[in-house]
Amino acid sequence: MSGDPAPRYVLRRVTPSESVINDRRYEADDPRHVVACVYDAEADVEVVWLRDLQLATRYPTASEVLAAVAQAKDPSRATRPIVIPSRPPLLAN
């Protein structure tokens, strides 16, 4: 048996100034395979999201974009439900 499973999201360099983030859960010919396009800017990178992710469009590095996608899609980041104390209804006067 191997150790950790392969990561779901990978960063792949397309040109010297452009990368894409791929979702390995989908085949390469599936439109959902490409999650985002990452372009090198002057001091940081710009991101064009191809999926509906509510994430920033600028990051310091492409690897930080990859980390943000992995964190946003990680099912373990869910929190326990917030307990709302139950109280009897107020009496109408």
Image (spheres, rainbow, N blue to C red):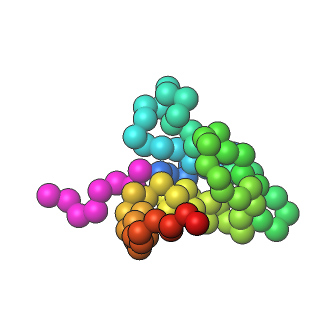
Reply yes or no: does residue 78 show up in magenta: no
Q: What main secondary structure does the magenta stretch of the protein show?
A: loop
Q: Residue at x 52, y 34 (%)?
A: 32
* Number of dots carrying numbers: 0
Q: Can residue 75 be seen in this view?
A: yes
Say if 35 sits above or below 67 in the image.
above
Q: Quadrant of residue 58?
A: bottom right
The extreme front residue here reads: 93
Q: Which residue is drawn at 43% across and 43% down?
A: 24
Reply yes or no: does residue 4 show up in magenta: yes
Q: Quadrant of residue 14?
A: top right
Q: In this view, does 41 lie to the left or right of 18?
A: right
The extreme right residue here reads: 42
| Residue 79, horizontal then vertical, whole percent | 41, 67
| Residue 88, horizontal then vertical, whole percent | 41, 69
Say if 24 sits above or below 2 in the image.
above
Q: In this view, does 43 lie to the left or right of 10?
A: right
Q: In this view, does 55 lie to the left or right of 72?
A: right
The extreme top residue here reads: 29
| Residue 25, horizontal then vertical, whole percent | 40, 40
> Where, quadrant-wise, is the N terminus in this rendering?
bottom left
> Where, quadrant-wise, is the C terminus in this rendering?
bottom right
Q: Can residue 14 be seen in this view?
A: no
Say if 53 sits above or below 4 in the image.
above
The magenta span reads 1-8
| Residue 33, horizontal then vertical, whole percent | 51, 36
Q: Quadrant of residue 31?
A: top right
Q: Which residue is drawn at 43% across and 31% down?
A: 27
Viewer-proximal residue, 79 or 58? 79
